[in-house]
Image (spheres, rainbow, N blue to C red):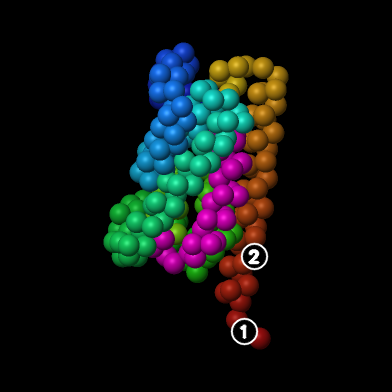
C-alpha cells in the first residue's frame, strides 16, 4: 500500500466519476470490460480494485470487480491451455519457479494459496494454472473464493479514500484481517496436501 501511494497516480475522484457518468448505462459495462482486460495482462489489478471502490463504493464496486476479474482470470487460463506448458512457463519469468512449485501437482488449495499470497500478481496464477493442468472447476471455484476477500480489501481502501467514514474504515480493517487469516489457512491446507502426496506408501 505504501508503494501504491507513492507510485500510482490515479485521476481525481471527481474526474473518474464524471467519466463513468458520461457513459451512462454503459459505464459499469465499460469498467467490467476494462477490468477483464487488465486481469489478462501483467498490469496489477490493484489499481482497478481501488478505483472501483472510489467510483462505485464498496457494494457495487465489489460486484463489478468480481465480474471483471473472473472474466479476465478465465481468459488467461484459456490462453495458457492453448499455448501449452513449455511456452507459458518460459514467459512467466521470475514467477515461473514459485508458480510451478505451488501449482505442480496442485489443485484447489494451491490456487487459493497463490491468489492470497502477497507479492504474487493474478496473471502468473491464471497462466500457470492453465499450463500446469489445474482443472477448470478447481480453478474457477478457488479463484472466486480466494479473490473475493482480496478484492474487497482493496475496494474498501478505495471507498475509504472517497469517503473516509467509520464504516469504510471498519471495512478496510476487517477485510484485511480476513485476507491474512485466509492466507495462513490456505497455506496450511496446501502444505498438508503436499505432505500427504509426498509421503511414501505404507
Residue 101, numbered label? none
Residue 106 appears in view: yes
Residue 119: x percent and y percent? Answer: 48, 43
Residue 57: x percent and y percent? Answer: 58, 25
On screen, 152 above or below 96?
above
Sequence-wise, the earlier of marks 2 and 1 is: 2
Is residue 82 highlighted in magenta? no
Using residue 190 as the reference point, say whether residue 82 is left or right of it: left
Residue extending furthest toward the top: 14
Residue 201, numbered label? 1
Using residue 71 as the reference point, say whether residue 80 is left or right of it: left
In this view of the protein, which residue sits in the foreground, 77 or 150? 77
Main SS, magenta region, reads helix
**Residue at (41% x, 32% y) in the render:** 30
Using residue 55 as the reference point, say whether residue 92 is left or right of it: left
Quadrant of the drawing holding the C terminus: bottom right
Segment colored magenta:
130-158
Q: How far apart are marks 2 and 1 (CA)?
A: 16 Å
- Element at label 2: helix
Residue 69: x percent and y percent? Answer: 48, 43
Q: Image quarter for residue 63?
A: top right
Label 1 neighbour load within 10 Å: few <14, some 14-19, many 20+? few
The residue at which mark 2 appears reads as: 192
Amino acid at each position: 500500500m505504501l508503494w501504491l501511494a507513492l507510485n500510482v497516480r490515479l485521476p481525481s475522484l471527481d474526474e473518474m466519476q464524471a467519466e463513468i457518468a458520461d457513459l451512462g448505462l454503459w459505464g459499469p459495462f465499460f469498467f467490467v470490460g476494462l477490468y477483464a482486460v487488465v486481469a489478462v495482462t501483467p498490469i496489477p489489478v490493484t489499481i482497478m480494485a481501488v478505483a472501483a471502490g472510489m467510483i462505485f463504493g464498496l457494494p457495487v464496486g465489489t460486484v463489478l470487480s468480481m465480474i471483471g476479474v473472473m472474466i479476465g482470470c478465465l481468459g488467461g487460463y484459456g490462453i495458457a491451455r492453448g499455448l501449452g506448458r513449455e511456452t507459458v512457463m518460459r514467459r512467466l519469468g521470475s514467477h515461473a519457479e514459485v508458480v510451478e512449485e505451488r501449482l505442480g501437482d496442485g489443485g484447489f488449495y494451491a490456487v487459493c494459496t497463490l491468489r492470497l499470497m502477497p507479492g504474487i500478481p493474478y496473471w502468473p496464477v491464471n497462466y500457470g494454472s492453465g499450463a500446469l493442468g489445474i482443472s477448470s472447476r478447481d480453478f474457477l471455484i478457488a479463484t472466486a473464493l480466494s479473490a473475493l476477500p482480496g478484492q474487497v480489501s482493496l475496494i474498501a481502501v478505495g471507498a475509504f479514500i472517497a469517503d473516509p467514514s467509520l464504516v469504510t474504515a471498519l471495512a478496510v480493517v476487517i477485510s484485511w484481517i480476513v485476507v491474512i487469516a485466509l492466507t495462513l489457512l490456505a497455506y496450511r491446507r496446501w502444505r498438508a496436501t503436499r505432505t500427504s502426496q509426498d509421503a511414501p506408501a505404507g
